Amino acid sequence: MKASNVKFRPLRRPGLLCLLVVATLCPSAWGQESRQKQDRFKPQPSGQSGIEPNAPGIIVSPNEDHRIGPGDVVEIQVHMAPELSSTSRINSDGTFLMPYLGRIRAQQKTSDELADEIAGKLRGEYLKSPIVKVVIRQIYSHTFFIQGAVRRSGVYQVEGRPTLLELLTISGGLADNYGTTAFIIRRLKPKTPDPAPTPETVEQTDAKTDPKEDSAPTDVAQESSSGKVSFEMLKANIAGLLKGNFEQNMVLEPGDIVNVPPSDVFFVAGEVREPGSFPLKEGTTLRQAISLAQGTTAKAAGSRGVIYREDGHGQRQEIKVDVDAVMRGREDDLILAANDIVIIPNSSLKSATLPVLNAFGTGVAWAVGGRLPGR
């Protein structure tokens, strides 16, 4: 059989060969790019009529429609009347300015209610059968803040009035080091000063004889004009809430700041197997602390244990405790406080005797070491 005279010549365009190889080995890259372009123009489902589906950070409540508030951005669309269509931000007084109609009050109204009101004002004089659509582009009136020991702290826009448990769930749940108490910081509404006095009120004021009554309106006016912002602090027991005590499940108000501090800790040091810091749960005792530290070592002088504790004035107290007696149930257990430092000292006698006992075996050393008296 004759050998073939076909000669293989090298490809003159190596770039074309590389392009073909990439296209053959990575067809998913081309498909993914095309799918991304298609998804970019794919309509997204809307959680509620009247709210822009792609509005960021909006948690739609299935129980009630969103009611417009100050700071929200609304778009008014009037069919066949583009000169009346506009996008406006709601002012602090709950109103916005609309062409032809002037100032419209939108606060505490749903998008459908506002659309019906605008259509009613336009009907007859400007349009025969107006068709109005109100779209909420951005929600700022239902802002809630959460920080601390949660998985996703930040600012959330939530319709309606969520509860503490719902906001904790929206933020991804509690972190591993969460404390037992949640603090809700709520801004108090400023006191409005009394209206300007009329001649009739001036006469009534002159007729008063009690000087305290005359000075009261002046104090209120000074507080409102000072510009100071006042807050109140509310507390909720998270440990009780998670155990079914729903009285702690407070209803939040827009603007509330929820802070979940990390849990308090205590420290165990000295002759324990696993020294370190441990989270302090409500009711944690000394016996539990020693157990968390995997118990004492053979060289421990448990009868000379010490707990260092700071009082409310920053002064450190030294509490002597017989840890061995507590662990054996001979003395009452102690409840630890935040930042307590439990020290288990070393026994010099046990340290000197332990190498000799180790020669007879580890088990003998541990058995005898636990009965050696401390000094």
Image (cartoon, helix red, strand yellow):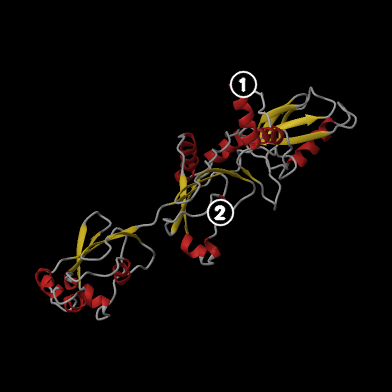
Dot placed on the residue nearer the N-terminal end, 1 or 2:
1
Q: In the image, residue 56 lies at what x, y percent?
A: 62, 38
Seen from the viewer's position, the closer of residues 334 and 68 is: 334
In screen coordinates, is 6 left or right of 334?
A: right
In screen coordinates, is 134 left or right of 212?
A: right
Q: Residue furthest bottom?
A: 330
The residue at the point 15 percent across, 73 percent down is 358
Q: In the image, residue 248 lies at what x, y percent?
A: 52, 61
Residue picked out by circle 1: 9
Which amino acid type is marked by label 2?
Thr
In the rendered image, which quarter contains the N terminus?
top right
Q: In the image, residue 178 lies at what x, y percent?
A: 43, 56
Q: Residue furthest top?
A: 12
Residue picked out by circle 2: 169
Which numbered mark, 1 or 2, is in the foreground of this view? 1
Q: Quadrant of residue 5?
A: top right
Seen from the viewer's position, the closer of residues 119 and 105 is: 119
